[in-house]
Amino acid sequence: MNEDFNPLNSRALWLTPERLHIESTWSEHVPFAMLLVELHRPRAIVELGTHWGISYGAWCQAVAALKLDTRCYAVDTWAGDEHAGKYDDTVYKSLQQHHHKYESFSKLLRMTFDQALAQIPDHSVDLLHIDGLHYYEAVKHDFDTWLPKMTDRGVILFHDTVVTARGFGVHTLWAELSAKYPNFNFEHGYGLGVLGIGSNLPAPTAQFLVAANRQPQIMRQLFAALGGRIRQGVEREHDARQAQVKRPLWHRGLRKIKNTIKGR
């Protein structure tokens, strides 16, 4: 790897995520999300498509841990779509409860991506994450309409860059854009494309892209391993909870009696 980029020097990369969910496909990218906040030190982060808030929770947690002067905006209707599926208000309420501690620098904008354009000034966004409807026309529309919001330090992330089923077209747009801008594409966790569109990228971000492209296999293996560890932890916790729920009532009652006798 490039000697100017050493993941062992990162503080954010090793943070324990506070927001995870078994149904999210984003947990495997949380370590990179936190590292990118540390490298890029964005003045404003916008996420288009938040759902459970796993990626957004990672941005906010890293901003808070690093004490950065960053504004964060999550944009979603929290009603679902053809690719995420439809869901009820419990998803938004769950995120809202977790989000309270970040309200000094973060906002949840419950609206469409196009409606949110009026809320964000042009040339103000350093980091944009696009993860909405995944048809080619939809994701290209999101890119085109939000591009004027980006600064000359701008980085745009695209999730699901390696998915070709169910009409997903992110991979097609990624092929077009990656031929024009500095980039790196992670292939685990359904793919995460990192696109450096700004003409004045911060040195640490530019150094990461150089290092990643010099030894792509090593970089992909590193973050796949880190993300896999997070995903395995989520699955173990989920399985443990499911096992607890499935235990017979008499077994749970017996344990409660034993704990009472022990004075616990």
Image (spheres, grey):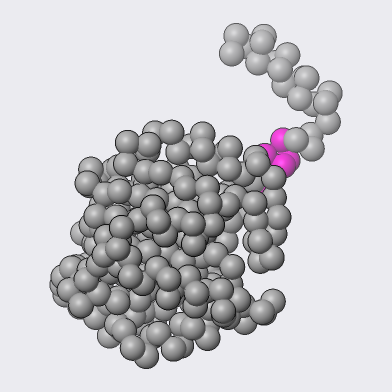
3 vs 155, nearest the viewer: 155
- Specify the principal SS of the magenta part: helix
Hey, which quadrant is residue 30 in on the image?
A: bottom left
Asked if the magenta segment contains residue 149, the reply would be no
Hey, which quadrant is residue 164 in on the image?
A: bottom right
Tally the numbered discs. Answer: 0
User: Taking the image as drawn, is residue 30 in sight?
Assistant: no
Q: Which residue is rendered at x = 48% and y = 70% of the image?
A: 142
Q: Which residue is rendered at x = 45% and y = 56% of the image?
A: 116
217 vs 201, nearest the viewer: 201
Task: Look at the image and give the residue range highlighted in magenta.
Answer: 239-244
User: Taking the image as drawn, is residue 66 in sight?
Assistant: yes
Q: Which residue is rendered at x = 24% and y = 55% of the image?
A: 43
Residue 33 lies left or right of residue 134; in this view the side is left
Asked if the magenta segment contains residue 240, the reply would be yes
- Residue 80 pos. (x, y %): 65, 56
Say which quadrant the C terminus sits in: top right
Say which quadrant the N terminus sits in: bottom left
